[in-house]
Image (cartoon, rainbow, N blue to C red):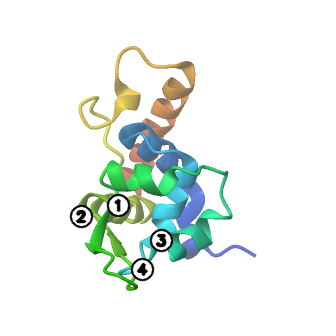
């Protein structure tokens, strides 16, 4: 039983690899940012609720805050909790992930995609070849 209209995740692994390589995110960082994408504002408790499912990293919240993936929406005042939101950069990147899952091509220029740099690992070269093939499939399907 196959539904061709619902295969958004067919190339998830390739898109995920590209995003992690381009932005220096870990799998756990990306997972938590994807979880928070639907939350307009969130507390540190909400962050930790999902973070419990991921590999243990006591500094993840502070690292994401420091690196600009999340930002303070409302500072803590006495007994009122601080609220956070995803940064514009994060929202733009996650929107881009969804666009790529919906069929937007992955960039093949080394200035936009580090996988296409000259001195990369064998794994990067394998993914690079797959991205070229994927982009060709996308272009052919639009014709």
Residue at which label 3 appears: 44
Q: Quadrant of residue 114?
A: top left
Query: Crowding near pointer 4: few (<14 within 10 Å), some, many (20+)?
Result: few
Residue sticking out furthest to the top: 119
- Helix, strand or loop at label 2? It is helix
Residue sticking out furthest to the front: 78
User: Which disc number belongs to residue 88?
Assistant: 2
- Helix, strand or loop at label 1? It is helix
Query: The C terminus appears in which quarter of the rendering?
Result: bottom left
Residue at which label 1 appears: 142
Q: Are marks 1 and 3 in contact (CB under 8 Å)?
A: no
Left or right of 31 in this view: 139 = left
Q: Residue at x 49, y 24 (%)?
A: 125
Q: Residue at x 42, y 66 (%)?
A: 102
- Whole-number angstrom distance, CA of label 4 to CA of label 1: 33 Å
Q: Is residue 120 above or below residue 114?
A: above
User: Which disc number belongs to residue 51?
Assistant: none
Q: Are marks 3 and 4 in contact (CB under 8 Å)?
A: no
Task: Name which of mark 1 and mark 3 comes first in the sequence.
Answer: 3
């Amino acid at each position: 039983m196959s539904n061709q209209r619902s295969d958004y995740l067919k190339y998830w692994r390739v898109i995920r690899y590209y995003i992690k390589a381009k932005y220096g995110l870990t799998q756990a960082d990306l997972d938590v940012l994807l979880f928070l994408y639907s939350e307009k504002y969130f507390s540190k408790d909400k962050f930790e609720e999902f973070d419990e499912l991921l590999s243990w990293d006591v500094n993840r919240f502070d690292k994401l805050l420091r690196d600009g993936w999340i930002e303070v929406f409302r500072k803590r005042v006495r007994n009122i909790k601080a609220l956070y939101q995803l940064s514009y950069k994060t929202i733009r990147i996650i929107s881009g992930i969804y666009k790529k899952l919906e069929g937007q091509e992955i960039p093949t220029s080394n200035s936009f995609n580090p996988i296409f740099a000259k001195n990369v690992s064998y794994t990067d070269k394998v993914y690079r070849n797959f991205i070229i093939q994927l982009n060709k499939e996308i272009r052919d399907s639009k014709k």
